[in-house]
Each structure stands twice: as structure tokens, then as C-alpha cells.
């Protein structure tokens, strides 16, 4: 006990604290000490990576920086990654003793993962069997699949199946990211918490696509002619931003609004050369009138990046984040920060609006996990 008191010793300049306050300080210090000891005796949170692409690799690197959490497996189908040590795939200066495998069953049978971080594709129909396999192995899931952020809109039957299967196996499934997952839904939902009335919500996000990854630039059609852009958008050869309808639907659901329809338009933004510099995507949630408007502009040469919010109601709320929240950095952060919340959540399919307020994981990951 004397050792603990020594740990709680006050700096010389603060030793004039009265006895009552000193006792409180020492009491709190002792509590922190034993709480930390308890955390350190818990098993580390075990993570399997399902997808080690651009975003998955960034997530892996952030996890490696955290205490109380460890990567125990990695899955990817890319031939140039399968069989290699994860440390080499991540271009680290050391090996991690984890071989990347193309076989989910082999990895998930070998280790007892608390959670799988899933980062393979944007579309739920393509990820469905992958997520089912993880659930059947008894692991929680946090995924960057945009359509999983609020799957009740486009795939209610798949959502129902995932929810039932997750409950059967006692695990939680969550889709999240910066957008959808935060900027155009969760953040707005939280801001309405101080409103007595809400009439309309408008969110504008402007991104300089020149600062984003090549895969994102390709997805929004940079360099195409306008006719090529229209044709490829029409046949879904390029997708534009995936998830804007899910964000509208999640926001409306949180407010109890049953929308009549969601209208989405996607138009090319032209560069001076006449070719496509990016896109502007507008989503409108209609309930008698236009209630929710999301305006996403992503193009090369955007002079100012920002996220602006206009909630008209009682009171009205106008806010602007400048420069806007960086997509990749924030996606990596919210995925890792959501790990303990997903583990703690009741079994089933959940969305960000179902979980506690998002918050940063700054201490040992085990501090945030309820076991």
C-alpha cells in the first residue's frame, strides 16, 4: 500500500493541499491503480482483419499502435498478399508472425477472435456471405461496407437474416465509416438532440478529390468525358459515392420520419479541359416536402474543403467544419473506436444510431470493453 501512496505523491509545489482534499486525491489514485491492474489482467481484444487493402491496411497500422488489442489473423484474396507476413504486406520494418490467408474458415477456426474488422467492398450483396461466415464462427463484426451502415433501405431481407443469425450466435454486426456512418448521419442525429422541433436538415460536403486515393478518383469518374461518365454511371461501371441514401434513411429513422421517397441525382463536374473533374451528388428525403438534403461535391480543384450543416427548427443550428473531415483518416478512426462499442452491444445487427455516442479510444482498449 505504501508503494501506491508513493505513486500518488503530489508534486512539491502542490503539497499545501488540505488533508481532506489530499485524502480524496489519494483515494482516487488508488482506485485508478487497481482499475489499471484489473485491465492489465484481462485478455487483449483479439482482432482478425478481413481485407488488407488500402483502408484495411491503415486500420491495421492504427490497431498496432493501440494497447490492449492485438491482430491474430488476416484474410485477403489478393494473390500478391496471400502467404505473406502481415508485416511485409503493411510495409513495416518488422514481421508480425501472421500469414495472410485467402481461407476465412481456416483463419477463424484457428483463432478465437473477439471481433473481425471487415473492409472488402461497398455492396452488401457481395459481402453477405463473408459476414455470415464470420458470424457463424462466433465473432463480432465491424465493417466499412457502406450499404451495411443502414441496410434496411435497400436490403431489408438480408438485414433481417443478418440480425437473426447474429442473435443466434450471440454477436453484433455493425457497418460504419465516415460517410455513411458519421458525417451525414450520426453527427446530424446527435445535433438534433438539442432541438425542440426540426423542419429541415441540409448537409453539404465538399472534397478536393486530388487529395484522395486513386481508387476514389476512379470511382467518381475523373478524366472521363461527360458522355462516358453518364454512360458508366447509368450501368454502374462507376459508382460515385455509395451510401448517401443509407445516410438519408438512417437520419430519417432516428427522427421518426417516414419518408415518401428518396431522390438521388449524380452529375459530372467539368474541369476547364471539358473532361470530368469529379461529381456532385444530391440526395433528397421527401416527406410532403423536402426534409433532408445531402449535397456531396467531390472534384479535383475544389478551392475550399468543408462540411456544412443547416438544421432549421427550434432552435436552428448552423455549423461549418473547415477544412472538412478527412475521409480516410476519419474512417480508420471510427472503425477502431467502434470496436469496444460493437463488442459491448447487445447481439444482432446494429447501426451507429443504436450505439452510444461515438468517442475516441485513447487508453488501453480493454478499458472500454465490458467483460
Image (tube, rainbow, N blue to C red):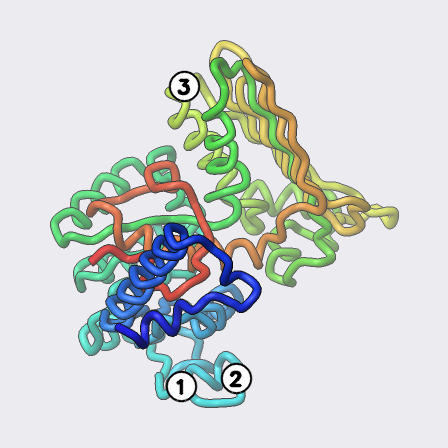
Taking the image as drawn, is residue 127 in sight?
no
Reply above or below: 77 against 289: below
User: Which sits in the foreground, 46 or 52?
Assistant: 46
Where residue 345 sits: x, y (%)? 26, 47
Classify mark 2: helix, strand or loop.
Answer: loop
CA gap between label 1 and label 2 equals: 9 Å
Q: How far apart are labels 2 and 3 at the CA level?
A: 48 Å
Return the disc, 2 or 3, that comes first in the chain's sequence: 2
Residue that numbered label 1 is attached to? 96
Quadrant position of the C terminus in the picture: bottom left
Q: Secondary structure at mark 1?
A: loop
Front position in the image: 132 or 310: 310
Q: How many marks?
A: 3
- Quadrant of the image for the N terminus? bottom left
Q: Nearer the viewer, mark 3 or mark 1?
A: 1
The residue nearer to you, when weighing 70 against 223, is 70
Q: Nearer the viewer, mark 2 or mark 3?
A: 2
Q: Eyeballing the image, is 359 above or below 202?
A: below
Q: Residues within 10 Å of mark 1 (few under 14, many from 20)?
A: some
Q: CA distance from mark 3 to mark 1?
A: 49 Å
Sooner in the amino-acid sequence: mark 3 or mark 1: 1
Q: Position of residue 214 (x, y in %)?
A: 65, 63
- Answer left or right for 111 relative to 118: left
Q: Residue, x 42% and y 32% (percent of image)?
A: 250
Residue that label 3 marks:
257
* Badge 2: residue crowd in 10 Å (few <14, some 14–19, many ≥20): few
Amino acid at each position: 500500500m505504501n508503494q501506491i501512496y508513493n505513486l500518488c505523491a503530489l508534486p512539491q509545489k502542490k503539497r499545501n493541499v488540505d488533508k481532506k482534499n489530499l485524502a480524496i486525491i489519494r483515494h482516487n489514485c488508488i482506485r485508478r491503480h487497481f482499475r489499471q491492474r484489473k485491465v492489465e489482467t484481462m485478455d487483449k481484444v483479439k482482432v482478425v482483419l478481413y481485407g488488407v487493402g488500402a483502408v484495411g491496411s491503415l486500420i491495421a497500422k492504427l490497431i498496432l499502435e493501440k494497447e490492449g488489442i492485438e491482430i491474430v489473423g488476416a484474410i485477403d484474396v489478393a494473390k500478391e498478399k496471400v502467404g505473406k507476413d502481415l508485416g511485409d504486406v503493411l510495409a513495416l520494418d518488422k514481421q508480425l508472425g501472421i500469414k495472410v490467408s485467402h481461407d476465412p474458415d481456416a483463419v477463424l477456426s484457428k483463432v478465437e477472435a473477439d471481433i473481425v474488422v471487415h473492409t472488402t467492398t461497398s455492396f452488401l450483396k457481395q459481402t453477405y456471405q463473408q459476414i455470415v461466415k464470420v458470424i457463424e464462427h462466433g465473432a463480432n463484426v465491424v465493417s466499412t461496407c457502406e450499404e451495411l451502415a443502414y441496410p434496411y433501405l435497400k436490403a431489408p431481407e438480408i438485414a433481417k437474416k443478418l440480425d437473426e443469425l447474429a442473435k443466434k450466435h450471440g454477436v453484433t454486426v455493425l457497418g460504419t465509416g465516415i460517410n455513411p456512418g458519421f458525417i451525414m448521419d450520426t453527427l446530424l442525429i446527435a445535433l438534433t438532440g438539442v432541438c425542440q422541433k426540426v423542419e429541415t436538415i441540409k448537409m453539404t460536403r465538399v472534397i478536393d478529390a486530388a487529395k484522395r486515393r486513386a481508387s476514389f478518383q476512379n470511382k467518381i469518374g475523373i478524366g472521363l468525358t461527360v458522355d462516358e461518365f453518364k454512360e458508366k454511371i447509368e450501368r454502374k461501371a462507376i459508382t460515385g459515392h455509395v451510401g448517401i441514401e443509407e445516410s438519408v434513411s438512417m437520419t430519417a429513422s432516428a427522427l421518426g420520419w417516414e419518408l415518401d421517397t428518396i431522390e438521388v441525382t449524380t452529375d459530372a463536374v467539368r474541369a476547364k479541359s471539358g473532361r470530368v473533374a469529379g461529381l456532385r451528388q444530391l440526395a433528397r428525403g421527401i416527406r410532403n416536402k423536402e426534409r433532408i438534403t445531402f449535397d456531396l461535391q467531390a472534384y479535383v480543384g475544389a478551392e475550399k474543403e468543408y462540411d456544412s450543416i443547416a438544421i432549421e427548427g427550434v432552435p436552428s443550428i448552423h455549423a461549418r467544419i473547415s477544412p472538412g473531415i478527412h475521409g480516410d483518416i476519419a474512417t480508420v478512426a471510427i472503425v477502431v473506436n467502434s470496436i469496444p462499442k460493437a463488442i459491448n452491444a447487445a447481439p444482432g445487427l446494429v447501426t451507429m444510431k443504436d450505439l452510444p455516442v461515438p468517442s475516441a479510444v485513447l487508453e488501453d482498449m480493454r478499458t472500454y470493453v465490458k467483460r
